[in-house]
Amino acid sequence: MAKASKTRTGNLREDCVAEALSIIATDGIDKLSLREVARRLGVSHQAPYKHYESRDHLLAEVLKGAYSQFATYLDSQLKKGSANENHLRAMGEAYIRYAMSHPLEYQLMFNTDLPDPSGHPDMLKQAHHAFDMLRDALRSRAKTSQRPMAAKEIDHQALFVWSTLHGFVSIMRSEVAAELKIGPKQSAATDVLSHIGRAIGDLSTK
């Protein structure tokens, strides 16, 4: 007798992505395989191959979705702000909120060995999107301050902001953070953003 399908939506392509995330969350990324996805969905072992050539293709789709969700969240938070709000600081605040509230997706995006980017251009495009938003915010800031900045300087500032935020989030999400007794997370985040601002200019001014 054929197994009853446990597909979530009836769209096997999307259900494979959802089940892959579930496997990673419960058992770790090393347990992800197309065979295990098929088993948990209750479909034939060959069914996922109709949509994904390999485990890497499925993982790339999972990562593409995570990067897209991340960029969409940053963009939505920026749109909520007022015209006078410092968008660079708002982006930093949104970055921290997303990382703390979406630990699985954040871990996947920034602490996972990526499938070969050259073979998965859609994934790479979404990964670039979030970083390009930071570049755009820095370009806008430079234009407003009437301080010309070369593309290389923009990139280096973006890397500085990103690496500082990533380091802060990584520490605050670690078990050792509770033992450091460094105070409330929100207060620490505010101070970190202010320090970043002083390092590159007016980020601390709203």
Image (cartoon, rainbow, N blue to C red):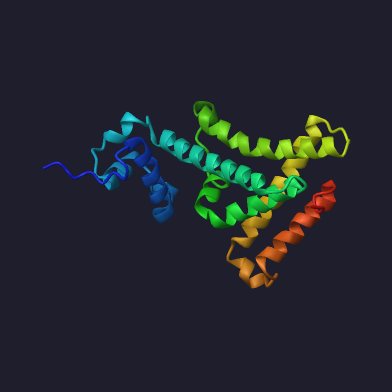
- Residue 14 at x, y = what percent? 37, 38
Q: In the image as oriented, which residue stretches furthest toward the left?
A: 1
Position of 100 with respect to 183 (left or right) is left
Task: Report the residue at 42% width, 50% height from top.
Answer: 24
Position of 197 with respect to 20 (left or right) is right
Does residue 113 appear anywhere in the picture?
Answer: no
- Residue 30 at x, y = what percent? 42, 47
The total of numbered circles placed on residues is 0
Task: Report the residue at 84% width, 33% height from top.
Answer: 149
> Depth check: 116 or 121 in front?
121
- Residue 64 at x, y = what percent? 50, 37
Task: Report the residue at 80% width, 50% height from top.
Answer: 203
Q: Quadrant of the N terminus?
A: top left
Give the quadrant of residue 54: top left
Task: Report the residue at 14% width, 41% height from top.
Answer: 2
Give the quadrant of residue 50: top left
Does residue 160 appear anywhere in the picture?
Answer: yes
- Residue 183 at x, y = what percent? 69, 71
Position of 123 with respect to 191 (left or right) is left
